[in-house]
Image (cartoon, rainbow, N blue to C red):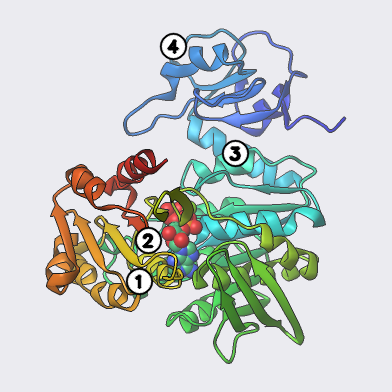
Amino acid sequence: MADPLWTLGEAIASCDGWPDGDMDQDAALSSVSIDSRTVEAGALFVAIRGDNLDGHAYVGQAFKAGAGAALVAENTKVEAAGPLIRVADTLKGLERLGRSARGRTRAAVIAVTGSVGKTGTKEALRLALEHSGAVHASEKSYNNQWGVPLSLANMARETRYGVFEVGMNHAGEIEPLVAMIRPHVAIVTTVEPVHLEFFGSVAQIAEAKAEIFTGLESGGTAIINRDNPHFGLLARRAREAGAGRVIAFGAHDEADAQLVEIQGSAEGSTVWARFGGEAIKYRIGAPGRHFVINSLAVLAAVTAVGGDLKQAAAALARYTVQKGRGLREVFTLTDGPVMLIDESYNANPASMRAALAALGAVPRSAHPRCIVVLGDMLELGDSSDELHADLAGPVDDAGVDVVFACGRHMRALFDALPGERRGVYAETSQGLLDALAGTVRAGDVVMIKGSLGSRMALLVDAVRKQLG
Ligand SMILES: Nc1ncnc2c1ncn2[C@@H]1O[C@H](COP(=O)(O)OP(=O)(O)OP(=O)(O)O)[C@@H](O)[C@H]1O
Ligand SMILES: [Mg+2]
């Protein structure tokens, strides 16, 4: 049998804590969790104090769900129905546990950051590396000050490949995270105006992304988007940080992992690419050029960690999009099909353009009318309205017939559209419910997209209910 993720004794030593009373320090802990609702049997529950909730209030619930132990702050009263590990600060304790997991593994470690495409790239890496050896990857978008140490702390010692998502909203956030991860390979998917409200310019966002290279193991590999205008800066920062190698990916003439050609369909893309001297052809099971570009970074990383390029490329045929990031469903009505594209998880100028371009490739023979329902792209700062209005071009390029819009900023796009393309505007997504229900009919393709905070998912659910 494989060793447990942690024994209680190892966890206590790793997080610099102390046992609260007698306990069997050889007891096995099978996972680490900070959410009492998803605690698995035998987990170590770490009580984190967040802005709104304090995990210490849920210790009892975690034990009820089967937690094997809880990591809690000193001098804090909790419902102790099982072994307690005490520490001065639980987030620091979790970080120490994460660092220990990193310290004891011999895995090749990959860190993924970028303005968009981190989760998609991480999931594609999970798939691409699977048959080369045991993969451990971050769950969901666990990429922040608790998500990164939590992901590390859950890494089994036998892991061959560790893949970690790293995110940020502000300058200076990536550096401490990547110091815990210590990757052999660092990927920057792309640099775009996302979270612009917290930065003076996109160049400053590039600088913040470049922090990922500060954590590279000596001589490690930086994988950078050659098509991005900030490639030069990123490559320079990577070298300054001691990267042994920079691999450029993209369609650019000078890319090392280079796109040669794409043949797209509603189900995905066939890709011809060149990796160094090697020409390969593969399929990606999700439609959209952006996934193709991300896949070049994925395969470059696979080669950098010594994985099997051909097998990895073949595995990408099984890649599917994650919920809210372009998931397509076709409903068959008596008079014809309706395609619903759920893009409700995320929106910013880059992902909007990518989604609209993919929408434009949906064959219009089966779907003569194209409707988009767009909610605000959040956190864009002073240029927000302008960035919203700028989508008029991509909307036109995609051949969209009707635009439904909601949110304060999406008004700017709505007003910039020609009259015949304007559907209905409402202040909130809720306000579009009835109008949308009354509009969708057989033959439509309907794409719904906005930032998570714009609550577009309720429209997706409503359309799905109506048609399904
Ligand atoms: N290279 C790309 N260019 C533009 N858009 C992309 C790219 N890759 C993915 N996207 C789109 O960006 C959105 C977010 O994708 P994903 O969840 O992978 O990003 P993320 O960086 O993990 O986001 P988050 O910061 O929310 O964790 C999705 O709509 C996805 O289709
Ligand atoms: Mg993510």
Q: x, y percentage for residue 365?
A: 43, 70
Q: Amino acid at mark 4?
A: Lys
Q: Earlier in the sequence, mark 3 or mark 2?
A: 3
Q: Amino acid at mark 3?
A: Arg
Q: CA distance from mark 2 to mark 4?
A: 36 Å
Q: CA distance from mark 1 to mark 3?
A: 30 Å
In the picture provided, is 411 more to the left or to the right than 295? Answer: left
Q: Amino acid at mark 1?
A: Gln
Q: CA distance from mark 1 to mark 2?
A: 8 Å
Residue shown at 77%/29% (left/top)? Answer: 4
Q: Which residue is mark 4?
A: 77
Q: Amino acid at mark 2?
A: Ala
Q: x, y percentage for residue 443?
A: 37, 59
Q: Earlier in the sequence, mark 4 or mark 3?
A: 4
Binning the other alpha carbons within 10 Å of mark 2 as few (below 14), some (14 to 19) or many (20 upward) gives: some
> Height in image: 81 above or below 285?
above
Residue 171 image label: 2
Q: Earlier in the sequence, mark 2 or mark 4?
A: 4
Residue 140 image label: none
Q: Are marks 1 and 4 in contact (CB under 8 Å)?
A: no
Binning the other alpha carbons within 10 Å of mark 4 as few (below 14), some (14 to 19) or many (20 upward) gives: few
> Height in image: 91 above or below 447?
above
> Height in image: 430 above or below 272?
above
Tell me the quarter of the picture where residue 123 sits: bottom right
